[in-house]
Image (cartoon, helix red, strand yellow):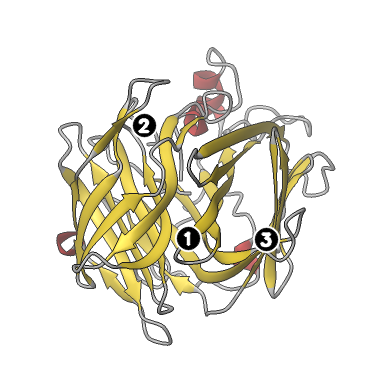
Amino acid sequence: MNPRRRLWLGALLAAAAPASAQPQARAKAPRAPQAVQRGRTLGFPQDHGAHLGARTEWWYATGWLGREAAPTQGFQLTFFRSRTGLAGSNPSRFAARHLLFAHAALTLLGPSPQHLHDQRIVRWNGDPGAPLAHSATERGAVVLGDWRLVDEGPHWRAQLPARGFTLDLRLARTQPLLLQGAAGYSRKGPDEAQASHYYSEVQLDAQSAGAAVGTQGRAWLDHEWSDELLHPQAVGWDWLGMNLFDGSALTAFQLRRRDGTALWAGGSYRPAGGVAQAFGPEQVRMAPGRRWPSPATGTAYPVEWTVDTPAGRHTVRALADAQELDSRGSTGAVYWEGLSELLDSQGRRVGLGYLELTGYAAPLALR
């Protein structure tokens, strides 16, 4: 998933209106039609764009630059959209019908790793031509001021001049789209309502377009939208997306109960040039290993995992422990997301990608 992605974090539900106004606004707002439906055929490039009828949506890109044996940096950027429910209660064209959020993170590896993070939040009235912030519906384009992610045909272009660092990347397509779940319909819980439309773009050729032009690596992009995602018993999720060096791609995730047991699980594996295999909830087992205690929040994150899927047994291990993101200035959640390596059953590094851990600092409230 990234039931992310990635769908999403706590404040996506707290959304745009003041807390005292939300119950009244939601009571008056008409019920939106279901944006996620089993059997719906995804079409591109339009489905790269926003789905304003969906309650929650995100575009999420992660990757690394440098050599496979010794990457120099990892990057993560996520653009979120959350529908506020104000459309029916406030007829003003200036009403904040959506919230747009964005996160950016850069992990610099080496003897003394650094993890840099920044965030943005903007209220948006839904006008596709709004100059300061908008999300296009006919193509992939999300803009928050000078932060943007745009589908330019053969590649995605990401430009995020952040506080203390800049992400300026071209993410070029090298493989067909990977439709997660059942042709892009991805279950996230035991109830049919807990589902999303979800696809991934794997094995993207990542190239820095900024100061370090010519630096190359690999990236992964998820786009997901949903009406409802988390089961009432779910407090968070563990997710990984790994680009293997042989050209294949592995996804695995689980939704956790408060006691740490898996409520739901899933994922997929696609060999290079082959057909994707979607995993059922009984086919994925994720066992946590070593934990890293955050000195900033006191949260203990499992930064090493044993993952069993039909693709085999793998170990996922963080390349730097300190990759916690404090997004209380935007989405409101504290979570861990970082560049990690994928090891096979013989302990050999066979891929790189990102691991995401949510709900450890506090339960998520994405219902």
Foreground of the two, 195 or 222 = 222
**Which numbered tag is attached to residue 140?**
3
Q: Is residue 84 left or right of residue 229?
A: right
Where residue 206 sits, quadrant-wise, is: bottom right
Residue corresponding to mark 1: 70
Mark 1, secondary structure of its residue: loop
Asked whether the residues under the numbered discs 1 and 3 touch, taking CB atoms below 8 Å apart as contact, a structural biologist would say no
Three-letter amino acid code of the residue under disc 2:
Leu
Q: Earlier in the sequence, mark 3 or mark 2?
A: 3
Mark 1 or mark 2: whose residue is earlier in sequence: 1
Callout 2 crowding tier (Cα within 10 Å): few <14, some 14–19, many ≥20: many
Q: Is residue 280 above or below residue 273?
A: above
**In this rendering, does residue 194 appear at all?**
no
The span from disc 1 to disc 2 (Cα, nearest Å) is 35 Å
**How far across and down, in percent of the image, does residue 319 sit?**
40, 49
Return the x and y of residue 12 as percentages of the image width and height. 51, 33
The residue to which callout 2 is attached is 364
Q: Nearer the viewer, mark 1 or mark 2?
A: 1
What amino acid does circle 3 point to?
Answer: Gly
Task: Point out the image quarter for the C terminus.
Answer: top left
Q: Are marks 1 and 2 in contact (CB under 8 Å)?
A: no
Front residue of 180 and 37: 180
